[in-house]
Amino acid sequence: MNNEQENNLYIILSNSIIATVLPSIAELNLPNWWLAGGAIRNTVWSHIFGAECQLIIKDFDIAFFDLQGNREQELSAKSILTAQFPNHEFDVKNQASFGRWRAGATIYNSTEDGIKDWLHTATSVSVSMNRKGEWQFFTPYGLKDLFAGIIRPTPTHINDIRAKNKASELMQKCSNLKLISL
């Protein structure tokens, strides 16, 4: 691990369902994939704030990047994971094609570009697993907001109503969170 915060993140995630799901995602061999979003954020916030925080894993957001990929690739990966984990939802998105089929979406040059553009800094935290089974983290805005329970929009979503609405939804389920604008 690169630092103490990444080590703490690893400890929390490795003692959750994420540790069970991560190797199965790795087996799909999706190019430049990352598990990111609410699954990580909600796992950490539930760990930190306990029963007062009613956030659960709604789904597992898996982002990858394949210029040659198509929608069928996403659906196939989702189907395989759903068969292995029928009690969980999976949202698998190729960041290379995301902007082509989602109206108004930005065109990304990498998975990391897509993750940097998620609504909040604490949601832009991602984990992957290499072929040796080692965990890797991509945290473009660091981990301070995640561990402090801060909801802060990413730079492209400062005045985005979707970011504000999502922040309100999160705060209703976990009153310990703090909303901070840039």
Image (spheres, rainbow, N blue to C red):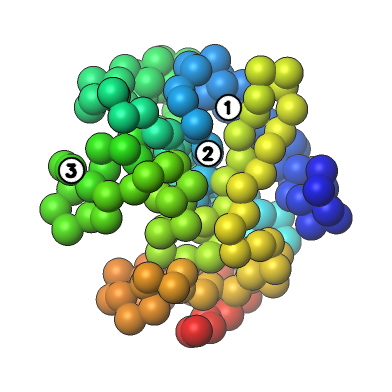
Say which amino acid is labelled 1: Val
User: Sequence order check: which comes first, mark 1 or mark 3?
Assistant: 1
Q: Say which quadrant the N terminus sits in.
A: top right
| Secondary structure category for the residue under label 3 | helix
- Left or right: where 155 falls relative to 22: left
Indicate the quadrant where residue 168 lies.
bottom left
- Secondary structure under tag 1 reads helix
The residue labelled by disc 1 is 21
Nearer the N terminus, badge 2 or badge 1? 1
Mark 2 or mark 3: whose residue is earlier in sequence: 2
Which label lies toward us, 2 or 3? 3
Contact between labelled residues 1 and 2, with CB atoms less than 8 Å apart: yes
Is residue 126 left or right of 16 when viewed as pictured?
Answer: left
Which residue, given by chain and number where applicable, does mark 3 sit on? 100
The answer to whether any part of residue 103 appears in the image is: yes
**Mark carried by residue 35:** 2
